[in-house]
Structures are given as C-alpha cells and as structure tokens.
Image (spheres, grey):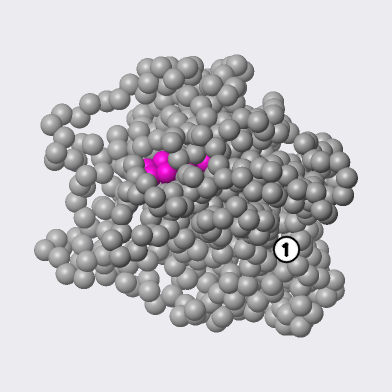
C-alpha cells in the first residue's frame, strides 16, 4: 500500500489549515498513519469495531462513514466482545497493527472496561474512542450520566484510568494535536505498549477547528528496538558463562520482537534447554530437541523438573506471572535470573539481573559476548530425557478411552487434523491448562491462550479478531476456537459477527455442565461442589441442557453435536472444508480425564479455620509448598 492522503490543500503544508470537526480530524489522522513491516507499508490502524449510540453516532459516525474504505468498521454485537476482538487482532499482528473500538456514552462505554483490562494485562495495543458527557455541561444531567455531587468532572470514562496505558479526556479541539501522536506512540512502544482511551464529549466531537494540514500528512512508523546496555550484557554473560545448569524461558515478547529465529539459534549454539510460558507457546515447534515443554502451574513435568534444578535462568520477553513461576516456587532458592525485557518494570522483577532491551538485539549481544560457551552435555541430556517422558504422558493423555471424552482427548483429535498454519484460540476456564499442557505446536506463533487476564468470553470474540488478521495473510488457514459451555453462555454473539463478515471460524464447544475447572478447584481445596456445575446449584429447580447446535444455527453457523472423539474428529474434518463458521458440540467429563501431571505449586487463598476437615487438610498441603517460594520482590 502506498501512503496516500485525500483532501489535503495544495501549497505549503506548514501554513495550510483544514477546517474539520474533532471527529473528522481524529479519523483523518488515523487514516494517514502507516507502519513498515518487513519492507511493506500498511496502515497501522486496520479499522475498528463499533456500536453506535447517541454518544458517538452523530459526529464520530459521520467521520467514520466518510473513511469507510480506508478504515473499515465492523459492527459489533457487544462492546466487551468488540474489545476482545481488537485485542486478539493486535496479538495476531504481533502488536504491530491495531484496531479501534468506538462506543456510546454510558453503558456502551462501561462494557469496554473488561476488554481494556485484558489488553492492559497482556500489553496489547487497542484504541478506544468513546462518548462522554457534554464539555459545556449546559444540558447536565444527561441520559446515562453518572452524577458525582462533589466532582462534576468524574464519570464512567474515568474508570478506564486504571486499565489503560494512556488516558485523556478531550475538552478542546486543539488537544488532539498532542494526544493522538502520544496515543499512537504508546501503542507502538515495546516497553509501554497497551490500550489507549480517549474520552470524547458528545458536543465536542462535532466542534470545528482549523487544524494544520501537516497534521494529516502520511507518516510511516517503525517499531523501535532498544539496544542493551553493555554493562548489563557483561553482567548477564558473567552469570551465564559460569552456569552448570542454564535454562531459557521463552515468553510472548519473543514473538512480538520477531526474535523466534534468534532465540532458537542462541539455544542451539549454546546447547541451552528452553521452556515456554503460556503467552510464549509456539515459540518452538513441539518436537524441537531443545523444547523441554511448557512451564508452570499449567505446564509439564519436564519443564518444571528442569526449572527446579536450574542454576541460571535467562527469561526472555515474559512478565513472569504466577502461572509461569508457580507463584515463585518453581525455581531453586539460589538460582539466578537474568531478565531480558523491553520493559524495565518486568526486567527488574524478583531481584533479577536486568537486561532492558529488545529481545532480538539483546539475544544477539549475548550470543556474541558468550563466545563458545555450551551447557554441560549431561544437563541437556537430563532435560531431553524429561521431555521424552512428558511426550509419552501426553500421548497417553490424549488417547481415546471409554466413557465421556476429556478435554485432552478432544485437543488430541484436533491437533492431529490441524496444519502448521491453523491458529488456536482459547481462554479462561479449564481449556488454557489443558491446551498448554497437551497441544503439540505445529507452527510458530499459532497458539493464543488468553491467560494474562484469564478472561472468559474472549474465545469466540478473540477468534473473530484473530480471523480478521489471519485473513489478511493466510486466508486458507483455519482459526480454531476451543470454548467451554460456561464461556459460550457468557459471550457467543460473535458467531453471528463471523457469519455476517464472512470470517469463518471453527468453534469447538466442550460441554461439561457448568464451570467444571472451578468445581475442581473447590474440591482440591477441600470445599464442597457449590454453584459451579449446574448439578450443584441449589437455586436450580431442574437442570436443563442447552441446545448449543440449535443456538449456533440460529446465528447462521453450520452446527452439529457429536458423542465420541472419533465423531468429533470427523466433524472437524468436515468443518475444515465448509464455507462458513462451524460449531461442533461435544459433552466432556466434568470429573475425570483432567491432566493430572505437570502442575507446579500455586498459591491460592484458603480459609485458615473451617468446620470442614477437608479444608484444613487441603490448606496444610498448600502451605507446605510455601517453603519453596522465593522471597524476592
């Protein structure tokens, strides 16, 4: 795409002005921002998702209509799911491109809060252009306005301050001359990347101003690659070169940096085993000899065993959340951590030796300085033997058995039929753990397990956003969504969105009769099953099974229900050649068949006193694991 602009005046751009509304100026600016990716120039904003109301339709809607070819607007069914779709799009685009969401004032905007938090937790770019109360306050109080008697400026939009990297309320047309570039720079910064929220008062959106024409001149952006500090490189090399049992943790930042090849080459040259975080799944293919498996609470015995023995750990592009670190009990107390991250906040966690830089440039600097160092052969052999044991466990875990199928068996059936280009999307519930543990990555960067904010409802909406991104470069690949019945009931309307927009999904609904993974947590902590499975809800008079296939068909999807793993695989093969979104439903066991190995210790709050003896027993077991918890900051 050639960066072009329209409606700019002839003559000197330095002095020319354009009379535009605030909304028109925002849209015009976005339409003229480009990014260079692998030598190709594309619009950095790929369009947006919108639901119109009185807070954004008259003015912002007018501006978006005029730019509908440059910034396509997808009609959402729910503001929260629009945000999930935008986040998934950004993740699939490796944070190099983003989409905006626009919502009306009041509840439409409030519905975006959860999605903003998800994008913030996952460090994903997303732009929210939301209606707000009137700047003049002359008509106050207005429809959907929350009045705060002692603070008339406080409203729903202020709630987004806690879940955004950049927040601003535009109260004068000139403000966007500073706010829009600042917002864009935030979304494209590898260290500060995250969601941006712009509160746009309803009246101000339509106010006109003489904007400098130069503001709308096409600009080409590039993601910066901060270079490492030589002193920090030397300190990291000093630790690594003396390591007897080194280990690398590959996080999601490896993919965002485009450093997968560099990480693999570094590990191969220095014979260092690699483990993956949840966000870093598919940094390596499952059968690479240095891939020792997923780490942490939802990980593998192989990765957790090696992590517990490692003396030096090189963490690359990970924020080291508790499911990765086993609540900081997964590593030896005396192990040393080198933390390579573009964000200083992450690089300095738990008294790590920081290496604040881009993953690709940082690994290149370490590689050069580390010279001929290779990990001891017996250490690598131990790690690889552990991985072979884990491979055997997974093969057994996903194999069909009598009775109701398990999550793992459904995962295994799909895994066997996928290609290296197909993208897997899931979130929250029990599926993130089961996919992280059992999925064998066939293609680099093809697994999206939303566990940064652990957000139920992301699955189908995120699949839609991921499919929009995938269709731009790999239209023949499949986007495969794993979703439980609980998440499906929470948010499913983007099945309809995918049908309407022609972005095909394969949605796999695994029905275990409620929130089975939390029921398992209840039981593992000594609690009685209560209010999680439908069968254990005392306020339900008679459990009633939802006809998921009829519901999906009503939204235009092809849908069928199957009763066995073999039928499930056959249905998936049919879905792959179908011409629109397909939904496959299968009942799975809520109690048996869970992956029962690979779990690191996880700190979860339990009652210190209880009349239930089982709770005391479970608490004692959990507290016993605290002895391995690191006390770093």
- Mark 1, secondary structure of its residue: helix
In x, y percent, where is residue 596? 41, 50
Q: Is residue 199 left or right of residue 343?
A: left
Residue at the spot x=76%, y=67% of the render?
A: 226
The one nearer the camera, 184 or 381, is 184
Residue farthest to the front, as pictured: 138
Q: As displayed, is residue 208 above or below residue 465?
A: below
Q: Residue at x 30, y 25 (%)?
A: 546
The vertical placement of 629 against 295, above or below, is below
Residue 554 image offset from top left, x and y in percent: 41, 17
**Per the image, is 104 magenta?**
yes
| Residue beneath disc 1 | 359
Residue at coordinates 81% horizontally, 70% vertically from top-left?
365
Residue 343 x %, y %: 63, 68
Residue sticking out furthest to the right: 11
* Residue 86 occupies quadrant: top right
Front residue of 213 and 50: 213
**Is residue 435 shown in magenta?**
no
Disc 1 crowd rating (10 Å Cα; few below 14, some 14-19, many 20+) is many
Q: Which residue is depicted at the point 16% across and 35% down?
A: 540
Let me know if residue 204 appears in the view: yes
Residue 15 in percent (x, y) is at 82, 53
Q: Image check: 225 left or right of 208?
A: right
- Residue 264 seen: no
Question: What's drawn in magenta, residue-wise?
Answer: 100-109
């Amino acid at each position: 795409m050639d960066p072009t602009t329209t409606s700019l005046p002839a003559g000197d751009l330095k002095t020319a002005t354009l009379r535009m509304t605030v909304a028109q100026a925002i849209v015009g600016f976005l339409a003229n921002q480009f990014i260079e990716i692998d030598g190709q120039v594309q619009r950095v904003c790929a369009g947006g998702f919108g639901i119109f109301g009185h807070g954004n339709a008259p003015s912002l809607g007018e501006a978006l209509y005029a730019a509908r070819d440059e910034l396509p607007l997808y009609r959402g069914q729910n503001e929260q799911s629009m945000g999930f779709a935008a986040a998934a799009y950004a993740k699939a685009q490796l944070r190099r491109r983003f989409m905006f969401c626009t919502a009306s004032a009041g509840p439409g905007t409030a519905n975006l809060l959860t999605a903003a938090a998800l994008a913030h937790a996952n460090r994903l770019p997303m732009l929210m252009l939301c209606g707000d109360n009137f700047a003049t306050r002359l008509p106050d109080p207005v429809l959907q306005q929350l009045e705060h008697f002692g603070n008339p400026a406080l409203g729903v939009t202020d709630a987004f301050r806690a879940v955004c990297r950049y927040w601003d309320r535009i109260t004068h047309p000139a403000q966007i001359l500073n706010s829009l570039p600042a917002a864009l720079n935030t979304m494209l910064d590898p260290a500060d990347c995250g969601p941006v929220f712009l509160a746009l008062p309803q009246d101000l959106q339509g106010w006109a101003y003489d904007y400098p024409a130069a503001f709308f001149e096409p600009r080409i952006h590039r993601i910066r690659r901060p270079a490492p500090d030589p002193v920090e490189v030397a300190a990291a090399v000093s630790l690594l070169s003396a390591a007897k049992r080194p280990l690398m943790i590959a996080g999601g930042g490896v993919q965002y940096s485009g450093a997968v090849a560099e990480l693999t080459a570094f590990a191969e040259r220095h014979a260092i085993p690699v483990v993956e975080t949840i966000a870093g799944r598919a940094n390596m293919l499952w059968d690479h000899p240095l891939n020792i498996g997923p780490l942490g609470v939802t990980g593998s015995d192989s990765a957790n065993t090696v992590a517990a023995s490692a003396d030096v750990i090189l963490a690359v592009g990970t924020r080291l959340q508790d499911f990765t670190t086993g609540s900081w009990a997964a590593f030896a107390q005396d192990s040393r951590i080198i933390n390579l991250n573009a964000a200083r906040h992450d690089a300095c966690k738990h008294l790590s030796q920081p290496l604040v830089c881009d993953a690709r440039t940082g690994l290149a600097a370490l590689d050069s300085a580390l010279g001929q160092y290779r990990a001891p052969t017996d250490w690598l052999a131990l790690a690889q033997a552990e991985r072979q044991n884990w491979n055997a466990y997974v093969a057994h875990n996903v194999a069909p058995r009598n009775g109701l199928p398990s999550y793992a068996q459904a995962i295994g059936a799909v895994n066997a039929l996928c290609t290296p280009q197909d993208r897997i999307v899931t979130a929250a519930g029990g599926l993130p753990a089961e996919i992280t543990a059992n999925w064998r990555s066939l293609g680099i960067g093809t697994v999206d397990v939303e566990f940064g904010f652990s957000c139920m409802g992301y699955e189908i909406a995120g699949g839609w956003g991921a499919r929009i991104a995938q269709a731009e470069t790999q239209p023949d690949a499949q986007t495969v969504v794993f979703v439980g019945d609980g998440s499906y009931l929470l948010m499913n309307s983007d099945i309809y969105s995918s049908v309407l927009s022609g972005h095909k999904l394969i949605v796999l609904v695994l029905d275990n009769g409620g929130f089975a993974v939390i029921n398992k947590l209840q039981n593992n902590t000594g609690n009685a099953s209560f209010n999680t499975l439908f069968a254990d809800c005392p306020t339900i008079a008679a459990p009633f099974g939802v006809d998921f296939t009829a519901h999906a068909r009503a939204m235009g999807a092809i849908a069928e229900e199957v009763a066995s793993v073999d039928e499930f695989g056959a249905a998936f093969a049919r879905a792959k050649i179908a011409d629109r979104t397909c939904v496959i439903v299968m009942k799975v066991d809520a109690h048996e068949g869970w992956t029962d190995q690979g779990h690191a210790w996880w700190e979860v709050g339990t009652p210190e006193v209880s009349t239930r003896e089982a709770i005391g027993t479970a608490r004692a077991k959990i507290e016993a694991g605290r002895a391995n918890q690191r006390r770093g900051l």
